[in-house]
């Protein structure tokens, strides 16, 4: 068991969300599920909570209603080695009602924020040559989905 596990509060669509995320990430597993019992305000047999993992990161999904929607104050970063990988996660996480935001950020159809980030970004933005790093930053600020080739071109002053 990991020491810290993000807990995600869903508006009674946790089971659907887990299935959605599991279809996107190559390594996904539902670890356990618990259900509401008789006599509550939620129909018995409705999913209460589930533990699942995506790419080795464990999450707890709570299926408890609309009281606490997701905000951009918390997001999950998916590091990508290639543009093909950026495009893959971007298109799948914005599918069926997700929203593109800016600078590699998006919201999926459940309102959860994600950052689809090329691994090269940290190298470009932390380069000791501040002019190169600045050009990469300015290019990124104009993008919605990040374009690795365009970022590298800006970094190199082309």
Image (cartoon, grey):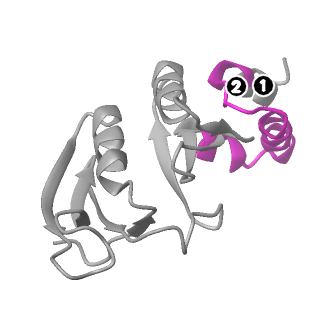
Q: Secondary structure at mark 1?
A: loop
Q: Is residue 127 visible?
A: no
| Residue 95, percent from left and from top | 52, 29
- Region rendered in magenta: 121-150
Pointer 2 residue: 152
Q: Residues within 10 Å of mark 2 (few under 14, many from 20)?
A: some
Q: Magenta stretch mostly in which secondary structure?
A: helix
Q: Which numbered tag is attached to residue 130? A: none
Q: Are marks 1 and 2 in contact (CB under 8 Å)?
A: yes
Q: Nearer the viewer, mark 1 or mark 2?
A: 2
Q: Residue at x 61, y 47 (%)?
A: 122
Q: Is residue 133 magenta?
A: yes
Give 116 or 44, whichever is nearer the viewer.
44
Q: Is residue 13 above or below residue 145?
A: below
Pointer 1 residue: 156
Q: Is residue 34 above or below residue 29?
A: below
Q: Residue at x 12, y 62 (%)?
A: 32
Give 43 or 11, whichever is nearer the viewer.
43
């Amino acid at each position: 068991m990991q020491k810290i596990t993000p807990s995600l509060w869903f508006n009674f669509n946790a089971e659907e969300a887990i299935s959605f995320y599991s279809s996107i990430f190559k390594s996904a597993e539902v670890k356990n599920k618990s259900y509401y019992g008789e006599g509550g305000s939620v129909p018995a047999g409705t999913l209460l909570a589930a533990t699942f993992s995506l790419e080795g990161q464990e999450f707890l999904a709570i299926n408890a209603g609309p009281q606490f929607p997701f905000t951009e104050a918390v997001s999950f970063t998916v590091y990508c080695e290639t543009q093909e990988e950026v495009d893959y996660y971007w298109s799948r996480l914005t599918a069926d009602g997700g929203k593109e935001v800016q600078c590699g950020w998006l919201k999926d159809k459940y309102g959860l924020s994600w950052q689809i980030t090329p691994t090269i970004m940290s190298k470009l933005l932390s380069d000791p040559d501040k002019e190169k790093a600045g050009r990469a930053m300015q290019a990124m600020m104009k993008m919605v989905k990040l374009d690795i080739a365009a970022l590298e071109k800006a970094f190199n002053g082309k």
